[in-house]
Structure formats: structure tokens, C-alpha cells
Image (tube, rainbow, N blue to C red):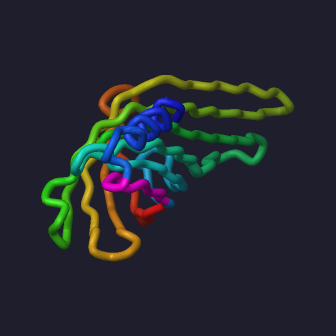
Amino acid sequence: MAVALLCCTAASAAPGLASAQPTFAVPQLGWSELRRFVVGAQVGRTIFGSLDVSAEGLVFFPAEETDREDVSLDRGAWQANLNLSYAFNPDRRLVPYLGVGASFARSSRTVVLDQVRARVVVDGWTPNLIVGLRVPQLPWSPFVEWRREIRRERQWMTNAGLRIPL
């Protein structure tokens, strides 16, 4: 997130570009094929024409599944992303965009069986591909996007939200 804030600050400091470069915030909800329900937020800035940079945080709420009553299972996951996206034909009613991102993700699993507790934490970086559609004519631009991890778990994620100008 520090890199995204640095990029946003650098873009706003460029002479003559600050007034033409909107900053935005994005509350979003989503669904992940591996981790289920997702809640997140982004903050970003248009840096050049139709090119956006954004920092994003996501929290996953995976389903807890166990067939035994004497076993307790607790899972959790979160991601911090830095995304770069390009909107095609931003003056249209429905604007398609493509993007790439770098994601740092952490997931944990805790199992308790007969008072014995075991915990596994997995984290690391992975690149993402992003494809989305946005409706920019409204004051708060709704969007839907699909994201695919390129390495690691290769999961698909669908997000929807509102892009709110700041």
C-alpha cells in the first residue's frame, strides 16, 4: 500500500496534472472460488489518461467445514493488492478495462482435535490478471470485475462495487 500511496502522491505532484487526475475510493463485495465471501476496499488515482493505479485490501470469509463434532476448524485469509488498470473508450456507457496486479496474500488454518491445536499459515506474492466493466456516467460508478491469480492457487474471484470520486 505504501507503493500505491507513493504513486498517487507523485502523480498529484506533477505540474498541471493534479486537477485532471481524479482520486477514487471503492467499497466492494466479492466471491472467491476457494475462499468464498470477500469484503474489501480500494483507494486509487487516475495517473495518465485512462490508466489507474490502486491499492486494495480484501478480507475473505471462508466456510468452516467439518463432519465431526469433536473437531474445531477455523480458517481466515486476507490480501493486499497493488493494481494497474487501463480503461478502453472511457466516454462510453459501459467501459471495459484490463489490469494487472501484485497480490500479497496470507491464509491460515487452525484445527483443534481433543485439546490439541495445530495451525498452518501460508503467505506470499502472486501476480493477478484483471478484466472488468464499469458504468462511468453515474455519480458513483458501479463495476464488476473478474480476477485470476497467475501462480499459487490460481483462483478466480468476482468483485462488484462502487467507484466513488473523492
- Residue in the foreground of this view, choosing between 95 and 17: 17
- Would you place residue 52 above or below residue 154 in this image? below
Quadrant hosting residue 72: top right
Please report the residue visible at 28 percent of the width from the left and 64 percent of the height from the top: 134
- Residue in the foreground of this view, choosing between 139 and 61: 139
Query: Horizontal and vertical percent for residue 8?
Result: 43, 40
- Residue in the foreground of this view, choosing between 78 and 49: 49
Please report the residue visible at 27 percent of the width from the left and 74 percent of the height from the top: 137
Query: Horizontal and vertical percent for residue 32?
Result: 43, 50
Q: Is residue 72 left or right of residue 51?
A: right
Please report the residue visible at 44 percent of the width from the left and 24 percent of the height from the top: 125
Q: In the rendered structure, does residue 21 fall within the stretch colored magenta? A: yes
Q: Is residue 85 visible?
A: no
Q: Is residue 53 visible?
A: yes
- Residue in the foreground of this view, choosing between 114 and 120: 120
Q: In the rendered structure, does residue 27 fall within the stretch colored magenta? A: no
Query: Horizontal and vertical percent for residue 151?
Result: 34, 26
Specify start and end residues of the magenta stretch as a single range.
19-26
Count of numbered labels shown in the rendering: 0
Residue closest to the far front: 15
Quadrant hosting residue 135: bottom left
Residue closest to the far bottom: 138
Please report the residue visible at 31 percent of the width from the left and 51 percent of the height from the top: 146
- Would you place residue 12 above or below residue 40 in this image? above
Quadrant hosting residue 7: top left
Query: Horizontal and vertical percent for residue 164?
Result: 44, 65
